[in-house]
Image (spheres, grey):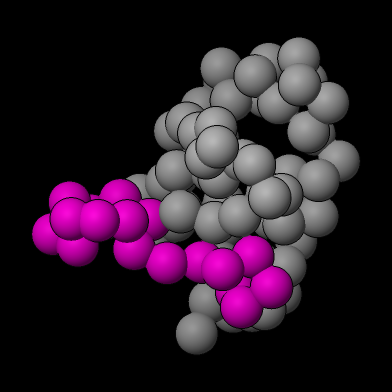
Amino acid sequence: MFLNLKIFERKDVFSYLEKRGLLKQYKKAKMFLMNDDASKVRFGKRNPKGSGIWYFRINKQYRALCVFDVEGNLIVFEVDDHS
């Protein structure tokens, strides 16, 4: 489904991840998505479904929020504290 998916992040996403010690977990989740193993990170559409916002799980507490651009790349724009 997502073979050859390219994932990009906004600049502030990395600083947020570093401050919370999530960078290694984020990169692992990103690798699962890029290797077409979306079920491991519970990739899905966020409610309401028509919003166009997708998410994937970084760990039990944090989710990466993202959208697809016109080229089909996934753009991570925020990391959400799911608790």
The quadrant of the rendering that contains the C terminus is top right
Measured as percent of width and height from the top left, residue 21 is found at 83, 26
Residue at (67%, 78%) from the top-left corner? 37
Q: Is residue 68 above or below residue 11?
A: below
Q: Is residue 54 above or below residue 44?
A: above
Tell me where residue 79 sits by quadrant: top right
Residue at (34%, 63%) from the top-left corner? 45
Q: How many labels sit on residues?
A: 0
Measured as percent of width and height from the top left, residue 65 is found at 45, 43
Residue at (52%, 40%) from the top-left corner? 82
Residue 41 belongs to the span the image colors magenta: yes
Tell me where residue 16 sits by quadrant: top right
Q: Is residue 16 visible?
A: yes
Residue at (46%, 54%) from the top-left corner? 55
Q: Is residue 68 visible?
A: no
Decide if residue 30 is on the left or right side of residue 63.
Answer: right
Decide if residue 16 is on the left or right side of residue 2.
Answer: right
In the displayed orientation, state which residue is furthest to the bottom.
1
Tell me where residue 40 sits by quadrant: bottom right
Measured as percent of width and height from the top left, residue 71 is found at 35, 58
The region drawn magenta spans 38-54
In the foreground, 11 or 19: 19
In the displayed orientation, state which residue is furthest to the front.
83
Residue 47 belongs to the span the image colors magenta: yes
In the foreground, 48 or 27: 48
